[in-house]
Amino acid sequence: MKPWILLRIAAALQAFGVVGHNLETLSTKPTHGPQEQAVFDAMRGFQFEIMGATRSTWDFYRGYQFSITVTFVLIMVLLWMVSSMARTAPSEARPLVVTFLIAQMFYVLISWEFFFAGPGVVGGIMAACLGAAAIGLYRSDQPQPVTRHLVNA
């Protein structure tokens, strides 16, 4: 499969991650009962001064949720852009793809350790796409053997 197609698949998987992340985090209503509500209330209740602003643990929790959404969208857009670059300038795209691959492998490890199977599996598939695209981009820079077709006269 062509590297640019693999990168588009990775971008689509990232879009799936954006949707999944937002479906699960935008609502602030607890879904796991009164114990979860107690945790949310405690996070909202613990306020502290930081660099001239008063914030709660809840503010940081929600802020990181929104920051992850922005980061996921950025990754999705950049992967799409790099997929176009892979078609026209594979040698320039390769270091970017390798950088995405390394970051994605760390994301997969973090997902399995701290989250659950969904992000780990989707992230693993994305890493496989990125790895295959990187290999494909490396191969596209290699000289191709010249084949001669003999025509019977």
Image (cartoon, grey):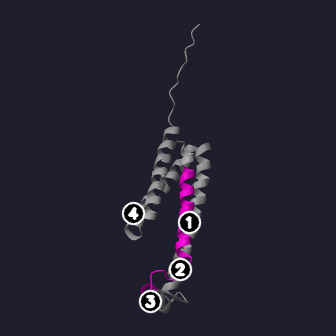
Q: Nearer the viewer, residue 64 or 118?
A: 118
Chain-order first, disc 3 or disc 2: 3
Tell me which secondary structure the magenta stretch mostly adopts: helix
* Mark 2 crowd level (few <14, some 14–19, many ≥20, 10 Å Cα): some
Q: Nearer the viewer, residue 82 or 15?
A: 15
Secondary structure under the numbered disc 3 in the rendered image: helix
The type of residue carrying mark 4 is: Leu
Q: Nearer the viewer, mark 3 or mark 2?
A: 3
The residue pinned by badge 4 equals 109
Chain-order first, disc 4 or disc 2: 2
Q: Which residues are magenta?
A: 7-36
| Residue at position x 61%, y 53% in the image | 81
User: Residue 55: x, y in percent?
Assistant: 53, 88
Indicate yes or no whether the magenta region holds residue 30: yes
- Whether residue 98 is visible here, answered yes or no, is yes
Chain-order first, disc 4 or disc 1: 1
- Is residue 141 placed above or below 32 in the rendered structure? above
Q: Nearer the viewer, mark 3 or mark 4?
A: 3
User: Residue 109: x, y in percent?
Assistant: 39, 63
The residue pinned by badge 1 equals 18
Query: How far is the residue under mark 2 from the one under mark 1?
Result: 15 Å
* Mark 3 crowd level (few <14, some 14–19, many ≥20, 10 Å Cα): few
The residue pinned by badge 3 equals 38
- Is residue 79 placed above or below 45 in the rendered structure? above
